[in-house]
Image: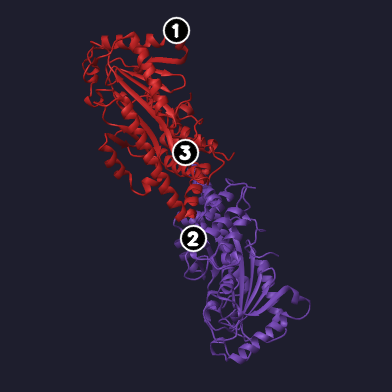
Chain colours: A purple, B red
Amino acid sequence: MKSWYTSETDGGMFISTRIRLARNIKNKPFPSHLDKKTAQEIAAMVFDIFNSGKIKHDFDTFYFNDLSENEKAVLFEKHLVSADFLSKSDLPRGVVISKDETISIMINEEDHLRIQVIYPGFKLKEAYDLARKLDTFINEKTPYEYHEKFGYLTHCPTNTGSGMRASVMLHLPSLTYAGSIDNILSSISKLGFTIRGLYGEGTKAEGNIYQVSNQITLGKTDEEILRNLSDIINKISTSEKDITKQLYQKNDAMFKDRCMRALGILQNAYVLSSSEFIQLASDVRNGIDLGIIKDIDPGALNELLVLTRPANIKKIAKRNLSADERDIFRAQFVRERLKQK
Amino acid sequence: MKSWYTSETDGGMFISTRIRLARNIKNKPFPSHLDKKTAQEIAAMVFDIFNSGKIKHDFDTFYFNDLSENEKAVLFEKHLVSADFLSKSDLPRGVVISKDETISIMINEEDHLRIQVIYPGFKLKEAYDLARKLDTFINEKTPYEYHEKFGYLTHCPTNTGSGMRASVMLHLPSLTYAGSIDNILSSISKLGFTIRGLYGEGTKAEGNIYQVSNQITLGKTDEEILRNLSDIINKISTSEKDITKQLYQKNDAMFKDRCMRALGILQNAYVLSSSEFIQLASDVRNGIDLGIIKDIDPGALNELLVLTRPANIKKIAKRNLSADERDIFRAQFVRERLKQK
């Protein structure tokens, strides 16, 4: 498997699918009440699981605080660790990441374990199956906090029950232009789902990219949640397609103009901010989906979505860059990646 | 010779040089007091001069009112007739235009004859020599109103004397950005010169293009006027180059970015207004002059300066276009002309 942001994807409306399971080890205080020694023991225990047998070649295990600030931010920009994980903590916090970056486990975030699988495209079942396999694999070595009636116990009550959050990242330019996102939010929130921006809670939907995910885990089976989410995603994507078609039929020149100008700018700019990139990339993605732009690899846009972020750009440049230098380096990087084939 | 707007030019700061001589036929009332019959006789007489001998193959002669409104506007956009000539008149007004569009003679505009030569680039002497040759050629067949003391007599006193207006069209982006055009105007107006926009008096300097010309004709020899104008143009172009160099050294990424984005948009847009074209073309021209843009023919920009104007676009399309359709057609025309070589 390839990471969600590699260029091996088919592009289009569906960017990625993520399953996250919250689990806690039996008879240990939750991280909010954990002492350093026990936190360290939990991390070491999980590291051991992934450092033994033949799977050890597939995973990296490390303590998050050993990383530089930029390395931490790189992982956040790749959605491999959460925003919460970036905030300072005295506890030893561990990370297990598969070499292909489809699996990441945060140790001692809000819960002892946050097991996460991200796949490119819309693949709820596949991502869930892998997450559960990992879950079972870990559970075989160590018992979890589990309550007959409530299910998995977690720090935050919104995660108690299945402990699962399933989310799909979607590109919804037409629904955004039509101003329909708030309507979607209000109708899906009644069903226990929500819609957020690219980098989760409280972030803007930069580049018309949204994450749709479940809010409720208690009293629902995983299967119910996944089925409902799948239905919602299908409905949203159908209405995105319908509106796009209507708008395109009404004014195809305006559509072509917007998509092609965006591509022209990305292929030629010498100074490019992260937020301008993501807006223009949205128009280019739209152009690819509509068949207007044919000679650009749609997967390159997913890749650039992550690689043009400030920390990733700094990592690629392999040196410290001022904000101005970063915009120049980003422009060059994007020009090269989006060269006419 | 090629017309000023063909792609045979070397691009750069100097777009075109124009010499215009105002002349009136001896013992005939000026056009403001002319009857139709005499006006017709004057036009026919001038037509005869250019329809005889071997030069007749080099010129077209016609009555301006026989043209459609669009054909009239095409000639105006090419700077072959004046804005005044476009306004309605009951008088028979004639036009003589050389096939290569370097020479145009308006008959019964404000004066009986407006003899004009326009060359691409900065060629004051060459343009003046040709205009005088035409002037002498006509004068051999018919005497002019000429006063020993005042020189050539004209309808408007600002033209009396030499009857000559010499002007150079220049691209001055850096002086414009630096806000120096008003200073230039105030310093050259003391010397009897002025600076105007692309389409003459009262028009905006779209695309950072200006015409510098003499205001005073009385009491100056043609040679003095041409020498002074030449000095002024050299001074202006030197300071344009100096400022550009300073700005470029200060922030080359910003310059590259602006020029390359402009090119990217022109090569990709599907909807393009005339005024957006001219602004973006200014940035591209700047990029060519600075050596940032190498694979675009600089002369193509001069050509597009005229051919993207509304009447010319309509003529090229060979059909009636709404304003929206014109913007789409213009975008396509520009895309094709500015394709990467």
Q: Which residue is mark 1?
A: B53
**Res A106 quadrant in image:** bottom right
* Residue nearest the viewer, comparing B232 with B107: B232
Name which residue lies at 57% across and 90% down: A34
At which x and y percent is residue A202? 47, 70
Residue B170, horizontal then vertical, whole percent: 40, 37
The residue sitting at 34% across, 8% down in the picture is: B141
Q: Is the residue A78 above or below the residue B46 in the image?
A: below
Amino acid under disc 1: Gly
Task: Determine which residue is flagged by label 2.
Answer: A275
Q: Chain of mark 3?
A: B
Sequence-first disc among 3 and 1: 3
Classify residue B181 as left or right of residue B335: left
Tell me if mark 1 has few (under 14), some (14-19) or many (20+) residues whose alpha carbon lies within 10 angstroms of its own.
few
Residue at position x 26%, y 37% in the image: B189
Seen in the picture, residue B94 relative to B127 is either above or below; the reply is above
Q: Secondary structure at mark 3?
A: loop
Nearer the observer, disc 2 or disc 3?
Answer: 3
Q: Position of residue B5 (x, y in %)?
A: 45, 30
Q: Nearer the viewer, residue B83 or A288?
A: B83
The three-letter amino acid code for the residue at tag 2 is: Ser
Residue B8 sits above or below residue A157 on the image: above
How far is disc 1 from disc 2 in space, using C-alphas? 69 Å
Q: Please state if B77 lies on the left or on the right of B340 as rendered.
A: left
For disc 2, the chain is A
**Residue identifier under label 3:** B12
